[in-house]
């Protein structure tokens, strides 16, 4: 059995990654280390093979806890743990800087102390800032690092501490930079699950600015598979951009959701734009396709249909969140109560 240490495995992408690895391998055991912040959810781990998945509640900023949880014979660390929502980073950057940067450094130190073979840093395309609209420019691995939000700045800084650990101490490290994910179990503060949840409840769908910002959407399972393949085949010291060549304006995403659910477009409510709102993300995935042999497997139409179906069939999962601390965030951020029609 090969052991891997996954941080942030109770979150959206980490749990999809764990599910994929357990389903598609038979010789991998996972230690899942997660602080269970507002975004971490043990419901995301229900039904996993208990012989190959062990959950440990802990914070990546806590050096002792990390060292205690990380086995000596572990092959790799996959660092998914992060504060991940841009809007929250605009309200306060504190947790973003400590978890995303210092937490990453603690994990790198632990990897060195325990001689872990490989470190996989799950980063984001947002470290590369924004692209002009109506342009043929894409993010590639040579694009400058020029983050625009506190979230993106913290993730860019995390990439830099990973780089420094490699240059200084020879840590074997690879970085993945993916575009916007969607799929089951995404916390309903992010665009797609927020819009699905509100539309299902006939509540307003808050669209920032003119709704014409562009994101490059990828189904979460495709991202998870790319991370696994980069771990297996990626070259130490390299970054790999991951994207499904699926650029969409926000308004197109929102109207597709409304149409799928048979709800009127009049539910769209234009609200004040996000500060520093990046206009366009678009990823050139040539490197991961050619060097690693990864390809997206899920079309936008299939992925969105599967996602909507999951939220329809798991309304209790959504409602448990909507009835919790989420209510306070929603009121502070949108100036209206969850459930306001
Ligand atoms: P998420 O917010 O759904 O989950 C984050 C998880 O990390 C949660 O389970 C949370 O409890 C855990 N966590 C937070 N702080 C922690 C700490 N200090 N110690 C231990 N665990 C902690 O996020 P996600 O969307 O699943 O994103 C996972 C990773 O992928 C993040 O690193 C994010 O930057 C990156 N990423 C996300 C996207 C996207 O579209 N969501 C795209 C590209 C990259
Ligand atoms: P989000 O899911 O927060 O991801 P990111 O900011 O990391 O790309 O937002 C995706 C896009 O949707 C982004 O352009 C902001 C926009 N958006 C809205 O228009 N309204 C909302 O309520 C939210 C949360 C996002």
Image (cartoon, helix red, strand yellow):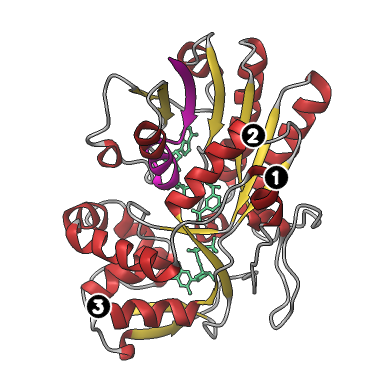
**Residue at (33, 89) in percent of width and height:** 265
Task: Tell me how far mark 1 sits from mark 2, CA to CA.
Answer: 8 Å
Where on the picture, by quarter, is residue 146?
Answer: bottom right
Q: Name the residue beneath numbered marker 1.
A: 291
Q: What is the number of the mark on residue 261?
A: 3
Q: Name the residue beneath numbered marker 2.
A: 233
Ligand 2 lies under 8 Å from the Cβ of mark 3 = no
Mark nearer the N terminus (1 vs 2): 2
Q: Position of residue 332 (x, y in %)?
A: 40, 64
Task: Tell me how far mark 2 sits from mark 3, CA to CA.
Answer: 41 Å
Mark nearer the N terminus (2 vs 3): 2
Quadrant for the C terminus in the image: bottom left
Q: Is residue 324 above or below residue 60?
A: below
| Circle 1 or circle 3, nearest the eye | 1
Q: Position of residue 313 (x, y in %)?
A: 18, 59
Q: Is residue 335 above or below residue 251?
A: above
Residue 300 falls within the magenta-colored stretch: no
């Amino acid at each position: 059995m090969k052991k891997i240490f996954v941080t942030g495995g109770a979150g959206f992408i980490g749990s999809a990654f764990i599910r994929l690895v357990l389903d598609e391998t038979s010789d991998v055991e996972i230690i899942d280390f997660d602080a269970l912040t507002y975004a971490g959810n043990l419901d995301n781990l229900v039904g996993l093979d208990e012989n190959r998945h062990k959950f440990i509640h802990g914070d990546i900023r806590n050096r002792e806890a990390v060292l205690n949880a990380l086995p000596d014979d572990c092959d790799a660390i996959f660092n998914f743990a992060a504060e991940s929502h841009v809007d929250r980073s605009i309200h306060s950057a504190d947790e973003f800087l400590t978890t995303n940067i210092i937490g990453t450094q603690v994990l790198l130190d632990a990897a060195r102390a325990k001689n872990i073979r490989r470190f996989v840093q799950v980063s984001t395309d947002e470290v590369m800032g924004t692209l002009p609209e109506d342009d043929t420019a894409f993010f590639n691995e040579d694009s400058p690092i020029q983050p625009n939000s506190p979230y993106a700045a913290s993730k860019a800084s995390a990439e830099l501490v990973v780089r420094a650990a490699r240059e200084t101490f020879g840590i074997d490290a690879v970085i993945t930079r993916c575009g916007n994910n969607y799929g089951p179990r995404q916390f309903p503060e992010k665009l797609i699950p927020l819009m699905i949840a509100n539309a299902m409840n006939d509540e307003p769908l808050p669209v920032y600015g003119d709704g014409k910002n562009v994101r490059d959407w990828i189904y979460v399972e495709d991202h998870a598979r790319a991370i696994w393949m980069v771990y297996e085949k990626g070259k130490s010291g390299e970054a790999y951009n991951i994207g499904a060549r699926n650029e969409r304006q926000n308004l197109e995403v929102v109207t597709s959701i409304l149409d799928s659910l048979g709800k009127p477009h009049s539910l769209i409510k234009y609200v004040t734009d996000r500060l520093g709102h990046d206009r366009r993300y678009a990823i050139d995935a040539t490197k991961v396709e050619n060097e690693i042999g990864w390809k997206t497997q899920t079309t936008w139409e299939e992925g969105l249909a599967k996602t909507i179906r999951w939220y329809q069939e798991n309304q209790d999962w959504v409602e448990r969140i909507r009835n919790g601390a989420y209510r306070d965030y929603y009121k502070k951020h949108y100036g209206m109560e969850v459930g306001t029609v």
